[in-house]
Image (spheres, helix red, strand yellow):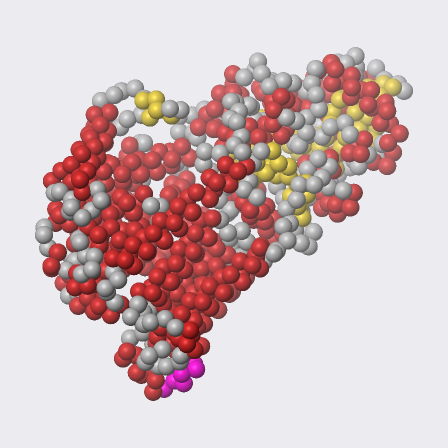
Amino acid sequence: MEHQQVEQTVSAGTVPALASQRMVVWRRLAGPLLSVGMLCLALWALHLLAREVNYHQVRAYVHSLSAGRLLLAALFTLLGYAVMTLYDRFALASIGHPLSWRRVTLISFISYAFSNALGMSLLVSGSIRYRFYIQNGLSTGEVARVVLFCTTSFWLGLLALTGVTLLWVPLPPDLPLASFGLPLGVGLTLLPLAWLAGGRIRRPLRIWRWQVSMPSTLTGLKQILVGACDWGLAAAVLYVLMPDELNNGFGHFLAIFVIAQIIGLISHVPGGLGVFEAVMLAGFGATGNAALTAPILGALAAYRVIYYLLPLCTATVLVLQREARGLRRKSLLAPWFTGLLPAFFAGLTLVSGAVLLFSGATRALPVRMAILSEVLPLSVLEVSHLLASVIGMLLLILARGLQRRLDAAYWLTLLLLLAGAVFSLLKGIDYEEATLLILLALALAPAHRLFYRRASLFSTSFSLGWIAAIVAVFGCAAWLVMFSYKHVDYSADLWWEFSFHQGGAPRALRALVAAAVAGMLFALASLIRPLQLHRQRPGEAELAQALPLIRQFHSAQAHLALMGDKSLLFDPAHKAFVMFDTVGRSWVAMGDPVGSDEEARRELVWTFLEQCERAGGWPVFYQVSPADLDLYLEVGLNLLKIGEEARVRLDSFNLDGKSRKVLRNTVNKLGREGLRLEIVPAHAVAPLLPQLKQISDAWLRDKNVREKRFSLGAFDPDYLVRTPMAVVWQDDRPVAFANLFLTETREEASVDLMRHLPDSPGGIMDYLFVELMLWARAEGYRWFNLGMAPLAGLQNRRQAPLWNRFGALVFGRGERFYNFRGLQRYKDKFDPEWESRYMAVPGGIALPMILTNVASLIAGGLTGVVRR
């Protein structure tokens, strides 16, 4: 048996050329930089368009909105979110996997409420859908089809509504696109019509490297109508809030609304914040007209609250209600739901921080300030205003820590939420935001079990998206300061003015600077933290630290760390480690984290993930066991089954019975021919290595193979002297050997490097395995690990994920390249128990490159993938 090839589980495909590091960096920076740049342009445009308007005028219009208008806007919002649930219902029907109306409605509403309010719709809404639908029996491919269906419906509806509106109502001449309104309307209308016409094409269309199966005409019509109704109701919410002076008909309003929405979406700014407002002001010709600009800005502010924040609060109540019900019943919440809670609390903390910063940037109500002046010293007011904004900035930072499940972030967030509520009352009797902060603190308090990580907050990596979000919130707060106090002439003395009724501008400036300083200090502390991840091969000292953990670990495969070809990442207390290597952008960890401390092992997965992200790499965990799958699901990795591992239960293993007749005869025959097994302790292996080297070289020449690596050992003297050796002797001549992996807990025994002379007696590998199992049973070991059968156990069913179907096809028909079935049958004759093995990988389009990298790593280079 060619044991050297047992774990070569990833077959090679076409290998794309690797992009240069500079291009990789620019691709990572492009999206966030574009979002921040577009936001800055939008805020600058708003500043120019609203230069004649002050904060009081905007607030006055909001307060003047009648209860009837507000209720009507809320009703249209409710109808709009009800229509959004049809996206998912039609998508599930199109793939033939319908779910109950209640489940689909709940998850659709929660996902859209969060994605609309927080932006990052593909990330937020897509991750919620993924977790929910996977738990309800959908495959990864089916979830991708649902997301694609919903996204297509979203854009088809917007394009159809925009195109028809532009053909129906001309754009205002002041808009830059006014002269292109008619051709633009024709072009946008033709796209949905082409989609409907494509429903008559029965075969898939090939677009570049993808094949697209067109939906039926009826399904395409449903997509367009749902999307158009969604956007039409969103426009109706804002329409009823707009001032009467702009009542030129819904069609004229809709033309400006849809153009503003498209530009906002293209800008990549979350929610189109600032961009949407600037286009709306320009579209209605409000430049320089304070009587028109202030009401429009007031209507837009009310629209943001009703259409975005109210659904977010409602979704929050639903989530908390579900959590409270689970706590009352003392039962575990659904895994998909529990996995969402950290991200849910992170989103709300981000919103709370933004609320505090925006509140600190705007003018307090005069009536409330008059009350405070009677009961509160001025110094308390000034300090409270300053600290409330600093807490706002810190909450933006802590939101990332909550998403990463940090225990320190949990406790700091609880403390700062309560402190923020107190300071909100002391700085302006802002009981509205104080109530929000207290409710969030009450919701977060019983969820401590979700935030178990003891890592430092300063070691948390901040993605470019998170940095862009924090910068965007701070930029909006700075714009609000300028907008709220544009009538105040700036002077150096302004920083030192303190007053109850005339000190609003100085307080806002001081608070803004204090928040900026808090953010910069955190960024500086994060930048100077030591980078723990390294790719140097371990020295003798590190291997000596790892050896006790290896011997106490339940899996004998942890001994692969002793090969010394993989870097070791320890936790701070050296209670566990991850062994890994890199190829391209893939940072591949071999197996599960090694160690008996479960908390240290769990933390190492997060640490490895964060430091890979910081290095711009893809974190991959290769050949992980079912018992630890939750470690990888919690950090957002996807799982691919790569085969099954054969483990023989030793207490029931023997050579009795008819089924073991062949093995029994082989062992007896070779015993009569003078073969015997000797277990050589590690300290006595070195003198035997010259003889064993001759066996190894002869085996490599005979099999025409070369040394593998990573998931297998190689003939390296420094490696082989670290483990005991099983040697098969024929008279006084060694004819076969295998180095042993033995755990001190007697949980498992296994072998790694197995080689024999080409002229050795037939059946020598059977003899070696049987004698080793009998020896291990006598020594008290529970299991003998025969290694993995690549791609075994994968199902080629219509509903199975694409990877499973492909792997099953290769397993069944790839015999000319690798003896997949033969290897499984060989191990099966020892009556093992088969246990699945997985690879944990990031989602997205990087998977083909990751598979190629892993194959290259195991084979010792790309040339080793295509040759033995």
Residue 41 lies, with reference to residue 166, above or below; the image says below
Q: Is residue 96 left or right of residue 556?
A: left
Q: Is residue 161 left or right of residue 705?
A: left
Q: Is residue 176 left or right of residue 609?
A: left
| Image coords of residue 304 (percent x, y) | 27, 57
Question: Is the stretch drawn in magenta largely helix, strand or loop?
Answer: helix
Q: Is residue 377 inside the magenta stretch?
A: yes
**Residue at horizontal 17%, vertical 54%?**
285
**Residue at horizontal 18%, vertical 42%?**
178
**Quadrant of image for the C terminus:** top right
Q: Is residue 838 inside the magenta stretch?
A: no
Residue 393 lies, with reference to residue 254, above or below; the image says below
**Residue at horizontal 22%, vertical 22%?**
200
Stretch in magenta: 375-380
Asked whether residue 108 appears in the rendered view, the answer is no
| Image coords of residue 89 (percent x, y) | 27, 40
Residue 731 falls in which quadrant of the image? top right
